[in-house]
Amino acid sequence: MRLSALLLLLAGLAQTMAATDPKLLLVEQKLKGFGDGDYAPAIERVLAEFETNTGVGLRPGALRKCGLKLSSEAGQGLATPKPLVRALGAALMRRGFAPDAIILCDVRQQSLQQCGFLPALSTEPQVFEGFPVVAYEPNAQRWSMEKKLCFENQVMPRPGAPTPPWGDARISVLPKTLFDEVDFWINLPVLSDSKSLGVHGAIAAASLGNMANADRFLENPANATKVAVEVCAIPGLAKKNVLTILSLERYQILGGPGFDANWCLSEKTILASANPVILDFIGLQKINAGRVARAVETIHPEPPVFSAANAGEIRLGSCRPSEIKLVRLAAE
C-alpha cells in the first residue's frame, strides 16, 4: 500500500473513531429572527455540524427520498414554522435531493390544510411549494393491510367516536411513508405541555403524532407514556429517524397540545439532536421556567416518560446533560 493511501485510510479511521454518537450530540443554534433569511443559514449550519460531528450524511440513499415529519395538529398557531421547512428543504436539495423527493407528512389532511401545507381542495396538487405532502389518515385503511404498520393497544376511543375505516378501534396505523418510502426522515415537532406525557415535543411527535387513531391515548397518561416509548423504539421507524429539529419560535407552557396564544412564549433558538429525550428534557425546563415566571404551578414530579425512555431494552437517548456533547452556534 502506498504511503499516501495509507495516510488517507488512517485519517478516515481517525475521523470514524472520533465521531460522536448521534444520540449524544445536541446542537443549539441561535437565530436573529424568524424569517426565511434567518432560518436558511442557521439550518445549513445545524446540518453541517450534525454531519461533521456524527459522520452521518444527510444525502440520498437507495430510495433517493427523505421525509420531513411536520407537526400541524394544533393548527396554524402552533405548527412547524414554514421558514424552517423551506430552509431544510433547500439544504437537502443542496445535498442531492430533488424537490419532489422531499416528502412532507403528518396525520390529518384537514390540519395540514388549515396550516397552509396543503391546498383547500383535495383535487388540487397535494404539494407545498414543490414538495409533495402526504396525510396519513386518507391512506391508513390501505396501510392497515400490512401487519408491521398496525400498532395494537387495548385502549379504546372515547364513547361515540367513529369506528376507524379498518374496522378495529384497538389498532393505530403507522406511516408507510416513513417505513418504506424514504432513506431517512427528520422530525420537526413543536413544544407544548401535555396532560398525557407532561411534555408534548419530540417523543410525542414521533409517536402519538405519527399514526392514525392515536387520540385514544391522549387522556390516558399511563398508557400514553408506554405507547409513546414503544412506538419510538419500533426498529423500522426508529432506524430512519436520523434527526429532530425543534424551533422555539413559538412554544406553549399551559393548555397544550391544543393551541392557546395566551400561554405561548418565543425564543430565537433552534435545538437539534438524534436524541428526542434530551430535547424534551430541555423543553420541560423551558416550560417550567415559563410557568414560574407567570406564577403557575410547574410540572412536577418529572413526567415518567423520561425514565421509561431508557428502561429495559429500550434506549431512546440520555437526558443527562453531563453525557451530552453540546455545540453552541451563534446567530450570523
Image (spheres, helix red, strand yellow):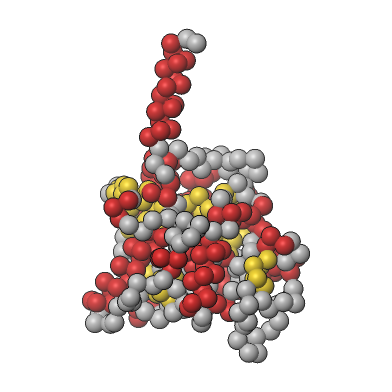
Q: Residue at x 38, y 49 (%)?
A: 24
Q: Residue at x 36, y 51 (%)?
A: 26
Residue 156: percent from the left, percent from the top? 63, 82
Which residue lies most toward the front here?
312
Pick whichever, 5 or 106, lies toward us.
5
Residue drawn where x is 64% and y is 61% of the image:
175
Left/right placement of residue 28 relative to residue 316 reads: left
Q: Is residue 304 above or below residue 220?
A: above
Q: Quadrant of residue 254?
A: bottom left
The residue furthest top is 2
Does residue 189 appear in this view?
Answer: no
Q: Quadrant of residue 143?
A: bottom right
Label total for image: 0
Q: In which quadrant of the rendered view does residue 173 lie? A: bottom right
Q: In the picture shown, does residue 62 fall above or below 304?
A: above
Please tell me which residue lies in front, 295 or 123: 295
Residue 17, horizontal then vertical, whole percent: 40, 33
Q: Judge left or right: residue 140 versus residue 85.
A: right
66 with respect to 297 (left or right): right
**30, above or below 47, in the image:** below
Relative to 303, residue 247 above or below = above
Q: Nearer the viewer, residue 319 or 206?
A: 319
Residue 108 drawn at (x, y percent): 61, 71
Residue sitting at 51 percent across and 65 percent down?
229
- Inspect this view and state whether residue 92 appears: yes
Residue 94 in the image: x percent, y percent? 51, 40
